[in-house]
Image (cartoon, rainbow, N blue to C red):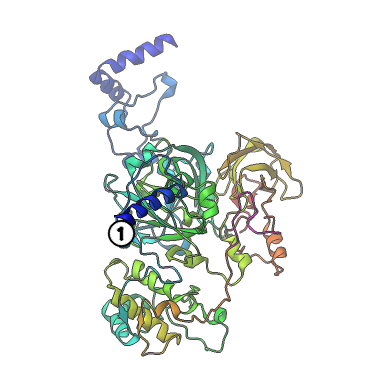
Amino acid sequence: MGSKRTSRRELLKSGAAAAGGLAVLGQTPASGQPASSQIATSQAPEHDHASGQVPMIKGTKGLVEYGERSHFVTSMRMAHPMGGRPSPDMFGKTFHIATPLQDSVGVITPSSLHYVATTRGAFVPDIDPKQHTLMIHGLVDRPLTFTMDDLKRLPSVTRLHFIECAGNRHNGRQKNVQESHGMTSCAEWTGVLLSTLLKECGLKRSATWFVAEGDEEVKGASSMPIAKAMDDCLVAYGMNGEAVRPQNGYPLRLMVPGFEGIFHTKWLRRIKTVDRYYMNYNDYGHLEKNSKEAALAFQIGPKSVITKPSGGQQLPGRGFYEISGLAWSGGGAIRTVEVSTDGGKKWNRAEIKATPQRMAHTRFGYPWNWDGNETEILSRCTDEIGQVQPTREQVAKYWNVPFDRSYRVPGLDNSVMPWRIAKDGTVTNGLA
Amino acid sequence: MGSLRFVAIALLLASPALAQSTYGVGRTPSADEIRALDISIGPTGEELPAGRGTAKEGATLFQAKGCAGCHGKAGVGAMAPALQSNKGQDLPIWERGRGTSGWMILPLTAPSATIVWDYIHRGMPLGREGTLTADEVYALTAYLLFVNKVIPEDQVLDQQSLPKVKMPIGDDYGRLPDWKHGAPRLQGYNH
């Protein structure tokens, strides 16, 4: 081993020698090319590991400044088919972009793979943080305007939180978990608690709601209860250890943990505290006849999905597999996850992989020996306040409506997702 | 002089009643700065700017501003959400409130006419948001409320009259629940 390491180091001592070494092996240096050109696997150099020589990635200025994943890793986001609208469209506007959950490990979604949604096809604002401010006014003793520098002077918090789009609905036509569940992601968010800012402004007792507004072309606005603002809302400037990405609200995003994605106001420029519900732009879509249905489109219920094995994947044969998946809830932390490997007859307690965080994706695993027979695998979760992820039949029963395959769960669809395993090991959508 | 001193003492006495800021970070925005950004219109209409408009003016603007291009000549039958119901007025609002695409018809089902004004003002026209004047938004709101038979054709909409428009939905819509830390999203549902 020692000698091998030395020889590599010697090889890297001189750029010319390194390039020569690669040329001898008949390979194309992968570095120095734009990342996009590295995505196609067909461009991957053929490695001859048998010779004991692994090709090297040459250091470039670009790679010194900002690292890249291996060109062997090809996991990508995709335009979410919801509404059948392409992203980007012919004008360069984006709408819905889904995360490749089938490739996910752990609980953090890399910022480059975080899901994106805009209320309608839109450009992403290109905001100069030096020009950007957050104004808080309305029912406060002292309206205040904060610059980005001001916000970074205040006490900060760092928390893991998922976001999920209300359009993250699974149906029988979807082929894989990216299509069925990819409109949710989880990141580590850093910023100032909204309660800190509202106290600094001297929040008046008469304030019962607040309106948060973004800086995109429609100045998208949402109304939310003050109780939520004072509980755990976060004005975030950090995402996964760096600045929030433009597609996710750079330079400032409101986090409303556990509420539907649309409330997490991107490019946050203003918060007004008020004494009644304002039904502004983003809120109009929540108009429902029934107050029970309106309630379900607010805080997200407990939800989980198996990401491996999942639709489009292939089990090479019978034997051991760790079933792996994600669970989350708007009601708090995940308490338990159960997995069934026989179509829902028997439920087994899954292992939770780390301390579950409130309103964060939680990774679970379940050891499974596949006997090679056709079956269906499912997961369900329970959160810290005892809410249980339902089957569609259970939801239909609650609403006292007849159940059939086309049944649409009210609010964000948090029902159980089945994956079907065929005898040949192919995994397909169990709702199909 | 005496009254000035009295005011000064009164201010000194009054100030402890306001909780003091903890960090002293951030600056006080001017009244003009607040006014310029204060565009979310609540149901009382207190944020509405001065201006006026009628359905007749709105009908002209609906064609001139390109609204008809996406929403259809009379606000129906094109790719953008329908803006006029073609169902009988005797039907309950929730039975005539959706367009063929399934979207709610905003100028018919909004619980307050201020919502229609707010939506047009911040969101329209597509790609040229923020270019309509206050008068134009009042006029377009009046036109859309008129074609849905919510207001008469000659009614002038302005800061005072817009919030008073009686919307056909009345109280027939679901209110959002009181949100509490650690509470289920819907009492008795458990999912």
Q: Decide which of B76, A344 is in the foreground and name it.
A: B76
**Image spot of residue B16 (x, y percent):** 45, 46
Q: Decide which of A287, B98 is in the foreground and name it.
A: A287
**Image spot of residue A180 (x, y percent):** 54, 54
The answer to whether one can see residue A186 in this image is yes
Q: In the rendered structure, which segment of residues is drawn in magenta?
A: B177-188
Q: Decide which of B69, A134 is in the foreground and name it.
A: A134
Q: What residue is shown at x 63% (from left), y 56% (from top)?
A: B185
**Image spot of residue A21 (x, y percent):** 30, 20
The rendered magenta stretch, by its main secondary structure, is classed as: loop
Can you say whether A396 is above or below B86 in the image? above
Q: Is residue A425 magenta?
A: no
Can you say whether B57 is above or below A309 in the image? below
Q: In what quadrant of the picture does the C terminus of chain A appear?
A: bottom right
User: Hey, which residue is sitting farthest right in the picture?
Assistant: A345
- Chain letter for the residue marked with disc 1 in the picture: B
Disc 1 on helix, strand or loop? helix
User: Hey, which residue is sitting farthest front in the picture?
Assistant: B2
Q: What residue is shown at x 58% (from left), y 72% (from top)?
A: A289
The answer to whether one can see residue A42 in this image is no
Can you identify the residue that label 1 sits on?
A: B31
Tell me which amino acid carries mark 1: Ala
Disc 1 crowd rating (10 Å Cα; few below 14, some 14-19, many 20+) is: few
